[in-house]
Image (tube, rainbow, N blue to C red):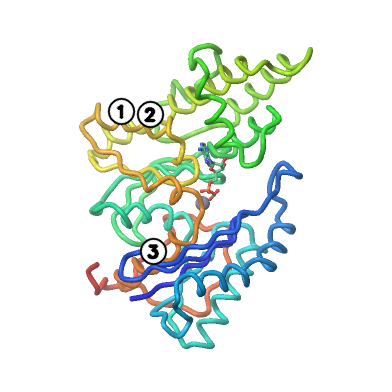
Amino acid sequence: MLFLGIESSCDETAAALVCNGRIVGHQIHRQDHRAFGGVIPQVAAREHLIFLPHVMDALWAESGFCAKDLDGIGVTAGPGLVGGLLVGILWAKGMACRWNKPLWPVHHLEAHALMVRYAHDVPFPYGLLLLSGGHCLMAVVSGVHQYKILGQTYDDAAGECIDKVARALGGPYPGGPFIQQCAEQGDPFAITLPIPLQKERSCSFSFSGLKTACIQWIAKNQAHGPLSESTKADFCASFQRNIAETLCQRLQYAMVDSGLKHWVISGGVASNTYFRARLQDTCQNYGGQLIAPEPEHCTDNGAMIAWAAAEYYAAGQKPDLFFPVRAHWPLDQLEPSQPPIRPL
Ligand code: KG4
Ligand code: ZN
């Protein structure tokens, strides 16, 4: 079975092929929005329009397959930036019509949530900690299109907070890898910063307070000249520790309350080695197991969309050619087709 996945919800133009459960083609064009310090939706959409044809050409050339060989197509239908999503959706719908192939609108967060099953044998139900640029939530994943949200962020996502703090430090966009690298040489206890929602026993998150505290700390300490490399390292290490504290605390509550033993982290922020190690420790301390996709499968990519299409197919989700684009699309609004018919 050969599935194509197309991803264009933010600033990666990506496409991949999954054949019989293995990635057989993987192309990604990462847009460069450093000049703007963040993603400008119109600029991103225009770049998707320019680069998607090249990404597709490279994918066919790399894999040796062609559109006729496909058994199905998945495309990110939301949540995300509408202009970019439309580029991928129109391409996918065009292909589905031309070659008479089944098409599935893929929920971007669900693709992050399911990608772990590409390389690991994780049975449903499992707990999910989803940490991306725009979303931060915990959920119980009971199957394809079956989610129960345990908690989400009241304001910013962890990724958003990391990107804004990196920008205040003069770092590139996206800021995650920059913060991680700076933090490697730093002391995580050197600088006192607030730990988000420390006194709230819930699975909710909040990162705007920490973001503001960090931006103010940077402004104050840079007032008389740039930060030294060692101060920057200490700051980044302390910032990462505070994020990890809140993530680990929420994971601990969720594990105790849900009784679930298998926990999955996913989304771009989950590629951070420090967060992975800290969450792993928490999970082990509470008798559970933390499972994460490979770091390159945590950040946005086409393989997770192709994999989601394969999962949708296996779960008996009905294909659909007439779905809309969805900027906002809560994960718990998905409904499984009944009955699921094809065991994976
Ligand atoms: O899942 P993703 O690729 O895109 C969205 O769906 O939003 O996540 C992007 C986010 C950005 O905020 C980026 O800074 C963050 O993931 N990120 C990281 C790391 N790599 C990417 N955050 C922390 N450490 C990293 N190594
Ligand atoms: Zn994502």
Q: Is residue 149 above or below residue 102?
A: above
- Residue 316 in which image quadrant: bottom left
Observer-side mark, 2 or 3, equals 3
Q: Which residue is drawn at 31% across and 54% down?
A: 119
Residue hosting label 1: 281
The reply to whether the residue tagged 1 has its Cβ within 8 angstroms of ligand 1 is no
* Disc nearer the start of the sequence (2/1): 2
- Residue 219 in which image quadrant: top right
Residue hosting label 2: 248
The reply to whether the residue tagged 2 has its Cβ within 8 angstroms of ligand 1 is no
Give the percent coordinates (x, y) of residue 279: 36, 32
- Which dot marks residue 234? none
Residue hosting label 3: 23
For the N terminus, the quadrant is: bottom left
Regarding mark 3 in the picture, which secondary structure is present there?
Answer: strand
What kind of residue is marked 3? Ile
What kind of residue is marked 1? Asp
Give the percent coordinates (x, y) of residue 30: 61, 54
Give the percent coordinates (x, y) of residue 170: 71, 30
Regarding mark 1 in the picture, which secondary structure is present there?
Answer: helix
Q: Which residue is drawn at 32% across and 30% down?
A: 252
Alpha carbons under labels 3 and 1: distance apart = 30 Å
Horizontal side of 317 relative to 305 (left or right) equals: left
Alpha carbons under labels 2 and 1: distance apart = 9 Å
Q: In this view, does 184 lie above or below 307?
A: above
